[in-house]
Image (cartoon, rainbow, N blue to C red):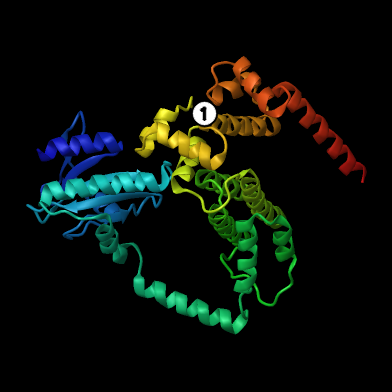
């Protein structure tokens, strides 16, 4: 494959600039659909080198933009010229995509590196080589030792590990009462200090608690995708809060909600015994595609199994057909949208992949015993009564 072709295609796929810069000729060659070459003046070249801190290294190197700290570049030494680099970037750390975006960038960089040098490099080697440039390892470990010493001298022991396990075990078993008892325990020790600013400290603790709760809920039988999605939502809401009491309350509600979800899963688990990984995979697929018109053949194809076998296995272990389960899950999502949003019934039906609003209403009434409109009115009336009662108390 021609190098220029790979560079142009990679730039297009990653939606990022790629160019070659020579500190000797001050030439800057762009690789894109409208690629160009131009000569930079000395001042512009010096500014570029200052921003990138270009270094002659034999592996792809991540460099934070020294002028705009939210951006970074990746530089690759031209193997045929000691004074030239291929540069990918700038990549904005605020552009979204998160870890998946970073993985795509690294994959593109390693393809370019292999094309230029004829040497392959895996992701773990790439990150290991970049460690010493991205963080001062000796300083990091020194700080850890210093923090441990100061913690022991000034603050005493942490909160008991056993108490945390009791909380997490309550979530795993779906025992909300035991969770509440564990939360109410009085114990010696203090929570670790996770940030200098108190609100940030409590948010960090909440994020850790919610993450652990989601993992123990999965161990208890909760759908993985549902658990991950719930954790994402609670953590985003934590970030939007402005006071410590709100953060603590949200954290506790998240823990209780995970315990409730496990309890509900166990109530609806008609099989008993150990979960079949294939059935769990079916449920994960269904949860992730609730907005689609889900076909059993598509699930079987995705899991690389025979559709008839999968349908039979599901019915034997769940005591309902896959079609019934799909409908129940869609209606469960629909009930939440009716209760907690003002989205129209027509939009909910469309969102959940029903052929029409009337079809959604028919299935909803079959499963719940009432129409979506009546269900929403009942909930709003109940909520209004509860708010009035709370205000008068």
Q: Quadrant of residue 55?
A: bottom left
Left or right: where 326 falls relative to 145: right
Vertical side of 281 occupied by 372: above or below = above
Q: Observer-nearest residue: 276 or 164?
A: 276
Residue 179 location (% of width, % of height):
69, 60
Q: Observer-nearest residue: 336 or 190?
A: 336
Q: Tell how many labels.
A: 1
Residue 85 location (% of width, % of height):
17, 50
Is any part of residue 369 visible from this angle? yes
Quadrant of image for the N terminus: top left
Determine whether the residue tagged by mark 1 lies in a helix, strand or loop: loop
Q: Quadrant of residue 340?
A: top right
The residue to which callout 1 is attached is 291
Left or right: where 114 falls relative to 319: left
**Furthest residue in direction bottom, as rendered:** 153
Residue 385 location (% of width, % of height):
86, 35
Left or right: where 345 falls relative to 70: right
Q: Observer-nearest residue: 76 or 190?
A: 190
Q: Residue drawn at (27%, 53%), measured in percent from left and top? A: 52
Is any part of residue 92 visible from this angle? no
**Furthest residue in direction right, as rendered:** 392
Q: Residue drawn at (25%, 58%), measured in percent from left and top? A: 126
| Label 1 packing within 10 angstroms: few (<14), some (14-19), many (20+) | some
Residue 230 location (% of width, % of height):
57, 45
Q: Residue drawn at (48%, 27%), measured in percent from left and top? A: 292
């Amino acid at each position: 494959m021609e190098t220029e072709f790979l560079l142009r295609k990679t730039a297009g796929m990653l939606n990022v600039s790629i160019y070659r810069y020579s500190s000797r000729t001050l030439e800057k060659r762009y690789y894109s659909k409208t690629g160009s070459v131009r000569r930079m003046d000395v001042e512009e070249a010096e500014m570029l080198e200052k921003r990138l801190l270009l270094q002659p290294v034999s592996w792809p190197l991540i460099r934070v933009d020294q002028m705009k700290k939210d951006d970074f570049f990746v530089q690759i030494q031209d193997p045929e010229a000691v004074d030239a680099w291929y540069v990918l970037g700038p990549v904005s750390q605020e552009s979204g995509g998160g870890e998946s975006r970073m993985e795509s960038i690294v994959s593109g960089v390693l393809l370019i590196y292999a094309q230029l040098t004829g040497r392959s490099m895996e992701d773990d080697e790439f990150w290991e080589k970049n460690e010493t440039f991205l963080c001062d390892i000796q300083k990091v470990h020194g700080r850890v030792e210093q923090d441990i010493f100061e913690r022991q001298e000034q603050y005493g022991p942490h909160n008991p590990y056993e108490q945390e396990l009791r909380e997490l075990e309550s979530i795993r078993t779906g025992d909300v009462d035991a969770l509440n008892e564990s939360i109410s325990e009085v114990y010696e020790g203090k929570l670790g200090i996770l940030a200098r600013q108190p609100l940030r400290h409590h948010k960090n603790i909440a994020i850790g608690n919610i993450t652990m709760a989601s993992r123990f809920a999965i161990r208890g039988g909760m759908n993985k995708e549902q658990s991950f999605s719930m954790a994402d939502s609670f953590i985003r809401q934590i970030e939007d809060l402005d006071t410590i009491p709100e953060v603590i309350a949200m954290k506790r509600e998240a823990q209780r909600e995970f315990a409730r979800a496990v309890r509900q899963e166990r109530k609806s688990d008609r099989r008993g015994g150990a979960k079949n990984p294939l059935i769990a995979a079916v449920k994960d697929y269904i949860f992730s595609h609730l907005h689609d018109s889900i076909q059993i053949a598509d699930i079987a194809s995705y899991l690389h199994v025979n559709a008839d076998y999968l349908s039979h296995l599901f019915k034997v272990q769940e005591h309902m057909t896959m079609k019934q389960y799909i409908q129940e899950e869609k209606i469960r999502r629909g009930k939440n949208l009716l209760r907690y949003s003002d989205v129209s019934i027509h939009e909910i039906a469309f969102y959940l992949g029903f052929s029409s609003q009337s079809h959604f209403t028919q299935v909803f009434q079959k499963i719940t015993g009432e129409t979506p409109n009546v269900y929403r009115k009942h909930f709003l009336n109940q909520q209004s009564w509860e708010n009035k009662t709370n205000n008068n108390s």
